[in-house]
Amino acid sequence: MKRRISGPARATAALVGLLVVLPSAWPDPAAQTRATLQIYLARHGQTDGNLKRIAQGWTDTPLNETGRQHAAMLAERLKGVPLDAIYSSTLSRSRETAQAVAASANLTVRSLPGLREIGLGRFENVSLDDPLMKTRPRGDQRGPDDGETTAQVTERVNAAIAEIRAGHASGTILIVGHAGANSYVLRALLQMTAQEKGPVSQDNDELYMLEFSPGVRARVFKFIPQGKFSEL
């Protein structure tokens, strides 16, 4: 069963065919052609910062118990998928999640600084509900103490994705990133502008899969756990 995304992600859906799918609707990895590249994009498992709604940014926080369960669930979901490589950011919560999959796939995780979460400067470790967060300058108006600008995040994420794509013309890979940075990863992979992409929100236990084949528009699938699925 599958549903089209509605709400904030509607602009993305219109451009790239973003679909919500249950596990049985995943494309069969064995059916992909030699020229097809499948990229699974995951967010790291839960941390105490996530649980408390703290803006973590570059703060190197580990997974909590629920986060370790999320990592194990990701490994189980990808069991049997013939992964060629696994990438993570350099932050512990991303690496630890990726390593759970790597252990069962007999692969080594490659960590790239360009996949790190968005740096928040003086707004790091502040509650997302704190009024201070509403004062953070937008986009490229940020000063040295305000964290990364949109241009800075775009540049480093684009470089990381270019490096990954250069090493994988086809096959199947996993990227484990972060809520904010993964939005830029999607934009880089799909070559979209910020306006075309629209807002994207990926929970700790949600998984995307992007499929690229020559001459065919990119397809994006989103795995939503059974308990979280509802009519749209």
Image (cartoon, grey):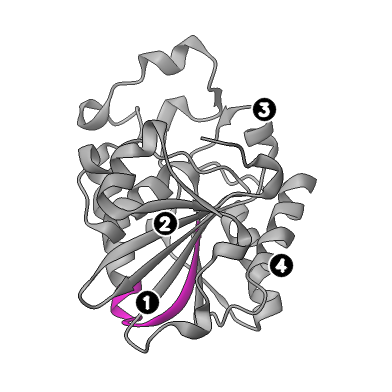
Instruction: Tell which circle, 2 or 4, labels the residue nearer the N-terminal end.
Output: 4
Secondary-structure class at tag 3: loop
| Magenta range | 164-176
Answer with left or right where residue 123 lies relative to residue 157. Answer: right
Q: CA distance from mark 1 to mark 3?
A: 37 Å
Q: CA distance from mark 1 to mark 2?
A: 19 Å
The percent position of residue 168, horizontal first and vertical second, equals: 35, 80
Instruction: Tell which circle, 2 or 3, labels the residue nearer the N-terminal end.
Output: 3
Query: Which is in the foreground here, disc 2 or disc 4?
Result: 4
- Kindly identify which numbered label has been placed on residue 115: 2
| 10 Å crowding of disc 4: few (<14), some (14-19), many (20+) | some
The percent position of residue 124, horizontal first and vertical second, equals: 49, 30
Instruction: Tell which circle, 4 or 3, labels the residue nearer the N-terminal end.
Output: 3
- Point out the residue furthest to the bottom here: 34
Are the residues at dot 1 and dot 2 in contact (C-beta closer than 8 Å)? Answer: no
To which residue does mark 4 refer?
76
To which residue does mark 1 refer?
37
